[in-house]
Image (cartoon, rainbow, N blue to C red):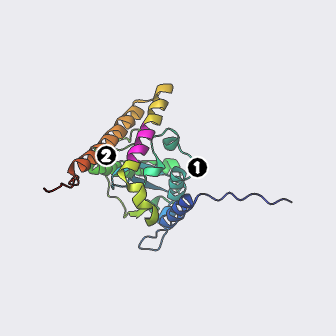
Amino acid sequence: MPRKAKFDPPPETAALRRQLQEALGTQDEQGRVVSEAQHGVYLFYDYDGEPVYVGQTYEGLRTRIRRHLTNQRTDAVAMNVLDPFEVAEIEMWPLWELAGRSRDEAKQRLNEAEYTVYAKAVEESEHGAILNEGDVPPTELIELPPSARIRIVPDEIFEDRKHPDTRIARRASTIAALARVISEREVRKGLRRTLLTQAKRLEHLAEQRLREADEEVPEQSPTNEV
């Protein structure tokens, strides 16, 4: 039988996947692999440490996070709400105490944990908003379990991806794609809110680059002394 062709991913993609796999193998103080918790809440951060997206899962932190950040598409990625390219760090809150419970049994605790993380993220955000297109129903704030926050981009890629001009181009492209989705479909208000948040994030980065340009000292032209 003929051998199947082997399609290896580009080196950068392979390096990112290895780093993500390593991050998802992080253990807590009791030696448990955090991402193996069936129930939990996760938060993504960009290259400035800005919180960008929060979610909850009852099917496993590892499974859900990989769906967002690899080739298994989710609604947030498909709708151009979340650009995996922009995610530099992940933070996970495992809810070990919910192990073995059904989705309905775990729902209230998951909602409380997600809203607590969401409120924390919005408070810490420079823009007072994150990219979630769906509303996170308000609940009482709870004491969260210890979290694990890990960078998922390898050193050899990090600085190139962190460059503001690269991110400006990427955000502009994401905004255009999201605006096109909105123009072609009947969408909820939350998606328009996400578009506004993305526009603010793009404006912030562009303003930062402009300030940096103003601070640059031009080289003095040589003069001919008589």
Circle 2 sits in a helix, a strand or a loop, which is it?
helix
Judged left or right of residue 87, residue 12 is right
Mark 2: amino acid: Leu
Which stretch did the figure color magenta? 167-175
- Residue sitting nearer the eye, 81 or 63: 81
On the rendered image, what quadrant is the N terminus found in? Answer: bottom right
**Mark 1 highlights which residue?**
72
Q: Secondary structure at mark 1?
A: loop
- Quarter that holds the C terminus: bottom left
| Residue 12 within the magenta-colored segment of the rendering | no
User: Which of pointers 2 and 1 lies earlier in the amino acid sequence?
Assistant: 1
- Where in the figure is residue 112, as x and y percent of width and height? 37, 49
Residue found at x 45% / y 61%? 157
Q: Which residue is mark 2?
A: 205
Q: Is residue 91 above or below residue 206?
A: below
Q: Main secondary structure of the magenta part?
A: helix
Residue at figure coordinates x 32%, y 58% from the top left: 143
> Do we see residue 184 in this rendering?
yes
Q: Classify 10 Å Cα crowding around label 1: few (below 14), some (14-19), many (20 and above).
A: few
Looking at the image, residue 119 sits to the left or right of residue 53; the answer is: left
